[in-house]
Image (cartoon, rainbow, N blue to C red):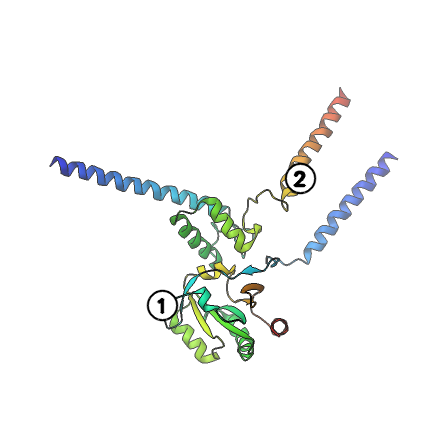
Amino acid sequence: MKTFKIFLIFFLLLGFSQLKSDEKDDVLKSKILKNIRCLICQGQSVYDSESDFASTIKLIVDKKIRTGSSEIQIYQYLREQYGNWIIYDPKLNKSTYILWLLPLLLFLFGGAIMYKKISIKK
Amino acid sequence: MKDKFRLFVIIIFLSFCFGIFYKGLDNSNVYAPKIKDKKNIPIFEAKKFNSSVYHKSEKIFKEDTFYIVNIWASWCVPCRKEHPLLMELSKNQSVKLIGLNYKDSMKNAKNFLTELGNPYSQILIDSDGTLGVEFGAYGVPETFLIDKNKKIINKFIGPINQEVLEEIKLIIK
């Protein structure tokens, strides 16, 4: 009876850990899908879209997660097929550095103007 | 003098913005990345029409010729429109047409080919659309031109028309 109880607890724990792992995969899947642009919809992520294209991408992301691909590997795969545009959060590289640096430059420029104005008032 | 300069800067800035938005009006809303580098055909395994055996991509594209991969489905209305052009293209000896039957039922696909003719030398089944993604497809219909080095050299989104047909003929000549 004792052995049976130990086995029962063991299998329950095993099932629970599987449940936890599925939950983790679902969170990762949602995160990735929200960061992928639906290329045939207007302003929608793959997560939000019900289009044919989005449903195929959802299937692929699901398969890739189940076969152990990381988030970066999945983004890389989609970039190779469709280019940088498919990812909402583009990587810092030669073609996107203006996109990343412009807000920072504008912020510094605005700050400098404000600082100058305040110093003149004083 | 200072006010005039400020006005000048504002006018230049507004003209610049107007120019950008005015130019943007003509831009297409459909995004299609240009093929800058010739991409290799993907490595995959797929079932052929009327067969339960999986075939490797290297065997499918084994001949030293141009290939056209056309994604089609019986439920796709634009596919009907481009089909006569594909039939015309299939008569050309310097190219082989490979059909990728996308998310379709076998019965409907067969009826489609019986009704309109079969331009394909081989038909692959893409029941869940994942094979299309390997090629970088958006949907259906879509056509890829593959050269003798097994590289994708052109991609046509949507149904092909007479103009595209002439372009393809010129490349494969």
Residue tagged by mark 1? B53
Look at 27% across and 42% down and name the residue there: A15
**In what element is the residue under mark 1?**
loop
Residue tagged by mark 2? A102
Q: Is residue B171 left or right of residue B40?
A: right
Q: Is residue A30 left or right of residue B164?
A: left
The tag on residue A50 is none
Q: Amino acid at mark 2?
A: Leu
Q: Residues within 10 Å of mark 2 (few under 14, many from 20)?
A: few
- Residue B168 at x, y percent in the picture: 60, 71
Q: Quadrant of residue B36?
A: bottom right
Q: Amino acid at mark 1?
A: Val
Q: Chain of mark 1?
A: B
- Residue A102 at x, y percent in the picture: 66, 39
Q: Is residue B28 left or right of residue B105?
A: right
- Residue B70 at x, y percent in the picture: 51, 69
Q: Residue furthest right?
A: B1
Q: Are marks 1 and 2 in contact (CB under 8 Å)?
A: no
**In what element is the residue under mark 2?**
helix
Residue at mark 1 to residue at mark 2: CA–CA distance: 54 Å
Do the residues at pointers 1 and 2 share their chain? no
- Residue B136 at x, y percent in the picture: 52, 59
Which of B173/B62 is in front?
B62
Look at 22% across and 38% down and name the residue there: A10
